[in-house]
Amino acid sequence: MIIAWTTTGQRADAERLARGAVEARLAACAQVEGPLTSFYHFEGKLTQDEEFRVWFKCLPANASALSNWVHARHPYQVPQWIEVSAESVGEKYLSWAIANSTPAPFPTSNSR
């Protein structure tokens, strides 16, 4: 299983990405948390922003398609996108995730 995440500046954007990825069956589950405070350099200056994190749980076969889907709909010019492989996943949870995800190529979805 792959765990991927991004952040957005607005809860509505985070929820839109989370819901859309699950509706498209690219992610078995997506969770929104926040607000959280991020500190980073952007365009030459230190920035502090309130953001919302979206966690995606997906099958390895869907990781590239999920990344492309999120990047095409993300409001940021340079969105955070990080993927890690889960070292261990409960057997029942993995079975559920497989049953609720469509391996790429996936059905066309108009979810935005």
Image (tube, rainbow, N blue to C red):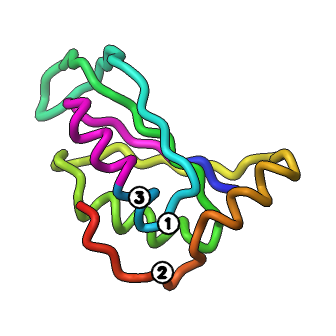
Residue at 69 percent of width and 52 percent of height = 85
As displayed, is residue 15 above or below residue 81?
Answer: above
Disc 1 and disc 2 in contact, CB within 8 angstroms: yes
Check disc 3 and report its element: helix, strand or loop.
Answer: helix
Instruction: Name the quadrant of the N terminus.
Output: bottom right
Q: Which mark is residue 106?
A: 2
Residue 104 location (% of width, % of height): 54, 80
Question: According to the image, label 1 marks what residue?
Answer: 25
Residue 31 location (% of width, % of height): 48, 37
Residue 5: in magenta span: yes
Say which amino acid is labelled 1: Arg
As displayed, is residue 95 above or below residue 18?
Answer: below
Q: How many marks?
A: 3
Residue 89: in magenta span: no
Residue 88 location (% of width, % of height): 84, 46
Say which amino acid is labelled 3: Ala
Q: Which mark is residue 83?
A: none
Check disc 1 and report its element: helix, strand or loop.
Answer: loop
Residue at 20 percent of width and 31 percent of height = 10
Say which amino acid is labelled 2: Phe
Residue 8 location (% of width, % of height): 26, 36
Would you call the spot at circle 3 few (<14 residues within 10 Å), some (14-19), or many (20 or more)?
Answer: many
As displayed, is residue 22 above or below residue 47?
Answer: below
Question: Where is residue 73, by image quadrant?
Answer: bottom left
Residue at 59 percent of width and 67 percent of height = 101
Q: Which mark is residue 21?
A: 3
- Magenta segment boundaries in residue numbering: 4-19
Q: Is residue 32 left or right of residue 87?
A: left
